């Protein structure tokens, strides 16, 4: 059976208006085209749908059945197509993504607020996890996109640099280093360091920079969460080198954040997705929003 949607829509217009001429106006077609479409539908179905006279058009019992069922089916189809069009226009959808905790804290609130205003029916599912787990989830296809720092390997991944996140020093406000506007790395010699452990994408970069600048210091504590590192610094147990995105705000009552110089070192935050999978319209919108909001940030 070869019944076209156009034929069904034309018949429903005739059934609704009770007139070929008014139906023709409704579907923006000629009266002869409307009549032909109904005839083709009747021929395909092998039944008469309309009784025509010179003065009026009446539906047969079969026509009434088709009109009732067809109107419901066309309504459901139109609703589905409109929903898909909204998704295509990035009006709705759930974005499943993963990012390192520093990005979840430092970037995602602004990104989610921006998207909520522009696309209020886009929802987020965000996993804030260690850098290596972000990459693993993107590789497996568990999430559509990820944000991470550090070295990223995998030929199946598309990796794009988003922004630079400087490494900074965090001290207690009563520490001597807090009196300086910026601190050379060499000033960390002899100090007890509180570090993020090797689940952090920035860990190796920090260790390499300490070695490269000739800093001789004691790694006193290693912790997985930035909040735990900051709590130890608050207790005056040492100083911390960490990415600026997880450093305390300037208004912090106890801790001070200072630039590290000679050299100035930054980690790169990367956007990551699989090469062989297209982003959903909603995820593509979020990817573009991140580029718009943070792309090229120093």
Image: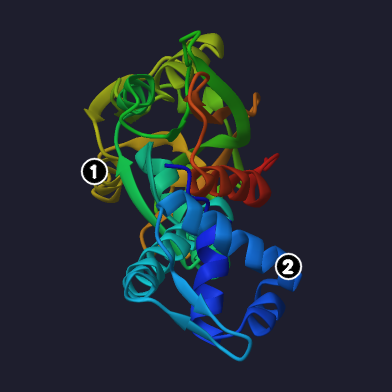
Q: Position of residue 21 (x, y in %)?
A: 69, 82
Q: Residue at x 26, y 39 (%)?
A: 225
Q: Residue at x 35, y 28 (%)?
A: 134
Q: Quadrant of residue 144?
A: top left
Q: CA distance from mark 2 to mark 1?
A: 78 Å
Question: Most extreme residue toward the front, as rendered?
Answer: 53
Instruction: Tell me, for residue 32, which label it has, or none.
Output: 2
Query: Toward the viewer: 186 or 126?
Result: 126
Q: How many marks?
A: 2
Instruction: Tell me, for residue 113, which label it has, or none.
Output: none
Query: Toward the viewer: 39 or 7?
Result: 39
Q: Position of residue 78 (x, y in %)?
A: 47, 64
Q: Earlier in the sequence, mark 2 or mark 1?
A: 2
Q: Nearer the viewer, mark 2 or mark 1?
A: 2
Q: Residues within 10 Å of mark 2 (few under 14, many from 20)?
A: few
| Relative vertical location of residue 23 with respect to residue 270 in this rendering, above or below | below
Mark 1 residue element: helix
| Relative vertical location of residue 286 with respect to residue 169 in this rendering, above or below | below
Q: Are marks 2 and 1 in contact (CB under 8 Å)?
A: no
Q: Which residue is mark 1?
A: 228
């Amino acid at each position: 059976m070869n019944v076209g949607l156009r034929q069904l829509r034309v018949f429903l217009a005739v059934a609704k208006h009770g007139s070929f001429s008014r139906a023709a106006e409704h579907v923006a077609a000629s009266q002869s085209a409307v009549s032909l479409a109904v005839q083709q539908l009747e021929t395909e179905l092998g039944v008469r749908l309309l009784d025509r006279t010179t003065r009026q058009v009446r539906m047969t019992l079969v026509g009434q059945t088709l009109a009732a069922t067809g109107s419901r089916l066309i309504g459901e189809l139109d609703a589905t197509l409109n929903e898909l069009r909204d998704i295509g226009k990035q009006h709705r959808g759930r974005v499943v993504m993963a990012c390192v905790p520093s990005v979840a804290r430092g970037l995602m609130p602004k990104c989610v607020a921006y998207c909520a205003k522009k696309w209020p029916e886009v929802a987020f599912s965000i996993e804030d996890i260690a850098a290596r787990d972000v990459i693993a989830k993107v590789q497996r296809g568990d999430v559509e996109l990820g944000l991470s720092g550090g070295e990223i390997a995998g030929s199946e991944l598309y990796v794009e640099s988003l922004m630079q996140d400087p490494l900074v020093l965090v001290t207690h406000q009563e520490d001597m280093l807090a009196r300086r506007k910026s601190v050379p790395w060499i000033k960390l010699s002899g100090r007890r360091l509180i570090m993020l452990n090797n689940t952090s994408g920035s860990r190796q970069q920090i260790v390499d920079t300490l070695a490269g600048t000739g800093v001789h210091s004691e790694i006193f504590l290693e912790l997985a969460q930035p909040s735990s590192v900051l709590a130890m610094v608050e207790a005056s147990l040492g100083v911390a080198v960490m990415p600026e995105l997880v450093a305390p705000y300037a208004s912090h009552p106890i801790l001070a954040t200072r630039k590290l110089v000679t050299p100035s070192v930054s980690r790169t935050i990367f956007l990551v997705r699989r090469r062989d999978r297209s982003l959903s319209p909603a995820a593509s919108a979020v990817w573009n929003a991140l580029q718009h909001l943070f792309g090229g940030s120093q």
